[in-house]
Image: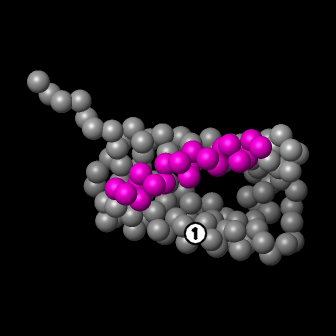
């Protein structure tokens, strides 16, 4: 497995864990982020969708789908921007920025892994 594929595989596993937590025990996950508990079904719907997206990342990693790796970069880097805007507008707690940092760190790992290795001369 290539280095970029490994980074995407790890990110896919992370998404499966987060998505499963939001689907099965959303308030436990929300408590970790210091977000108020909810009884709304939407958090579980979001968790299910995150599991689906995580599955796509696992398949992309297994199949070495480099175009998907590249396409994921701006998307994964953008989450922290959206979460920061939501926090500034007081639509979400600042604590959710942690999730954005995780996404950005994963995207950085993928981006660095995609860069060609320095030639050996």
Q: Quadrant of the C terminus?
A: top left
Q: Is residue 20 above or below residue 107?
A: below
Q: Secondary structure at mark 1?
A: helix
Camera-nearest residue between 16 and 71: 71
Q: Residues within 10 Å of mark 1 (few under 14, many from 20)?
A: many
Q: Residue 73 placed where, x, y %? A: 49, 48
- Point 85% across, 72% down: residue: 40
- Point 88% across, 45% down: residue: 90
Camera-nearest residue between 14 and 46: 46
Q: Quadrant of the N terminus?
A: bottom left
Q: Residue 116 placed where, x, y %? A: 27, 38
Can residue 20 be seen by looking at this rendering? no
Magenta span: predominant SS is: helix
Quadrant of residue 97 within the rendered picture: top right
- Point 41% across, 59% down: residue: 68
Q: Is residue 71 above or below residue 94?
A: below
Q: Residue 11 placed where, x, y %? A: 49, 54
The stretch drawn in magenta includes residue 39: no
Which residue is most to the top? 121
Can residue 91 be seen by looking at this rendering? yes
Q: Is residue 72 above or below residue 111?
A: below
Q: Residue 67 placed where, x, y %? A: 37, 57
Q: Determine which residue is flagged by label 1.
A: 51
């Amino acid at each position: 497995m290539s280095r970029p594929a490994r980074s995407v595989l790890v990110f896919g596993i992370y998404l499966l864990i987060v998505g499963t937590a939001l689907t099965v025990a959303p308030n436990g996950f929300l408590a970790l982020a210091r977000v108020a508990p909810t009884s709304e079904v939407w958090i579980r719907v979001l968790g299910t969708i995150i599991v689906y997206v995580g599955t796509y990342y696992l398949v992309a990693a297994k199949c070495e789908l480099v175009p998907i790796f590249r396409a994921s970069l701006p998307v994964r880097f953008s989450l922290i921007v959206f979460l920061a805007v939501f926090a500034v507008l007081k639509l979400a707690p600042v604590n959710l920025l942690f999730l954005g940092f995780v996404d950005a760190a994963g995207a950085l790992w993928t981006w660095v892994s995609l860069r060609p290795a320095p030639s050996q001369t």
